[in-house]
Image (spheres, grey):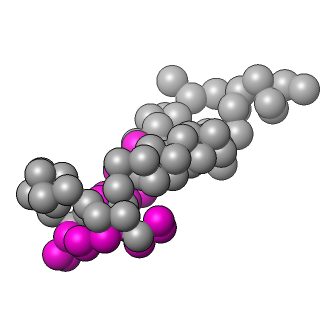
Amino acid sequence: MAGGWARDGAVQDQIDASVDDAVRHARRQLPRGESLRHCEECDTEIPEARRTAIPGVRRCVECQAAMDEAQAAHGGYNRRGSKDSQLR
């Protein structure tokens, strides 16, 4: 049940839109194409096992881990606002 001026189901629509956004973002992050033989960041050779396991891989394990950590540090944001932020 929505309150105020919102129609019924509006909250679920926001949740669904947030999930859809996250899925689209995750799919854009997936590697595509042929795997590189050398890391595009540090130019070290990418092992054959990694290239076979992850088609389209572009970075060595160390560089990919650093990139993943940097992206996690930024975190996501709630573009629709949270209930707590609206009460302040």
Q: Nearer the viewer, residue 28 or 61?
A: 61
Residue drawn at 80 percent across, 30 percent down? 85
Q: Nearer the viewer, residue 31 or 5?
A: 31
Q: Nearer the viewer, residue 87 or 18?
A: 18
Q: Which residues are magenta?
A: 19-42
| Quadrant showing the C terminus | top right
Q: Is residue 72 magenta?
A: no
Question: Is residue 87 visible to the viewer in this orientation of the structure?
Answer: yes
* Apparent side of residue 76 relative to residue 25 in the rendered image (left or right): right
Residue drawn at 37 percent across, 64 percent down? 44
Instruction: Examine the image and state in which quarter residue 69 appears.
Output: top right
Instruction: Examine the image and state in which quarter residue 73 appears.
Output: top right
Q: Position of residue 16 (x, y in %)?
A: 40, 42
Relative to 56, residue 13 above or below: above
Q: Is residue 22 magenta?
A: yes
Relative to 52, residue 2 above or below: above
* Apparent side of residue 11 relative to residue 64 in the rendered image (left or right): right
Q: Position of residue 65 (x, y in %)?
A: 44, 44
Residue at far front of view? 44
Q: Nearer the viewer, residue 38 or 79?
A: 38
